[in-house]
Image (cartoon, helix red, strand yellow):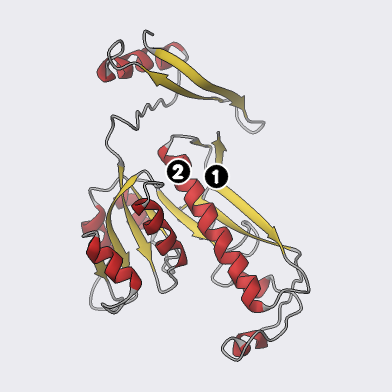
Amino acid sequence: MNGFFPLYVGFTSAITSKNKFCFNEFVFDPIKWQRKQMNEDFLDLSKMFNAVKSLVRVPSVDSKYKIALLASKQDHCLVDLLHAWQDGKLPVQISSVISNHDRVGNTHVMRFLERHEIPYHYLSKSKEKNVEDEILGLVEDTDFLVLARYMQVLSGNFLKRYGKDVINIHHGLLPSFKGGNPSRQAGSVFQFPNSVLSFLCFYAFEAGVKLIGATTHFVTEELDGGPIIEQMVERVSHKDNLLSFIQKSENLEKQCLMKAIKSYCELRILPYQHNRTVVF
């Protein structure tokens, strides 16, 4: 292959699978190796090895992945992604932000979206309308979806109709602490940080864990049961109160989601079987 200069070649296998997995990172000379020819060459190479799937992307040439961000009231992940996108650190095109929370106009998020002309869609849930139909109409031209703390369950019917990947951030280490409030489930002995958060501390921190974490995974019909992409952890102790506990958790969520999206855009994530991934 003229113009092919490898930077990294990864080759691995998994104990639970007969498949082999390969990831190549390279620079190329577009004069010696045209983009169309590159696709044909890699297609021939994949046939030679009987590859199940083969993908090639050239970030400097190919269009950026188009995504929609879905978020609820908590916006730490949403804000982090928007700022990373603004700074050129998130290699995607954000087509819209969709939420089940009605943000008022004069907020940091809304001002940011208006300034960058990113549409914001507030979709309230009611018996009279099907919110998932509305979402599908808004995201049909996207390449994948990101749930940036979107606290609504997407149905199996939605996932089948959308037909593309959906990435979610979960504020806990899956498969432990599934559901909506793992911070409460995983809590340790607490102190009262301040009057604003005091009422939350009435919830006892039952499990007394010493590590908290966040998980990014693909969304499937099984709640919080999709293939895991990335996990991050941080140590906690009896010295933490609820406020510091939540702050650490939110920071983990932001880092974990950001890394997963970047890995996805760089084709580093190779799903296999029904609930596993290889990540280069």
Q: Give the residue furthest to the front.
A: 87
**Label 1 sits on residue:** 275
Q: Residue at x 27, y 13 (%)?
A: 31
Q: Is residue 178 visible?
A: no
The picture places residue 155, in percent across and down from the top left corner, at 38, 61
The tag earlier along the polypeptide, 2 or 1, is 2
- The reply to whether residue 76 is visible in this rendering is yes
For disc 2, the marked residue is: 262
Q: Amino acid at mark 1?
A: Asn
Q: Position of residue 215 (x, y in %)?
A: 57, 55
Query: Label 1's element?
Result: loop
Q: Say which of 42 and 79 sits in front.
A: 79
Question: Between 2 and 178, which is closer to the camera in this rendering?
Answer: 2
Residue 22 position in % (x across, y down) = 52, 24
**Depicted 110 relative to depicted 90: above or below:** below
Tell me the tag on residue 84. none
Name the foreground residue: 159 vs 240: 240
Q: Residues within 10 Å of mark 1 (few under 14, many from 20)?
A: few
Q: Quadrant of the N terminus?
A: top left
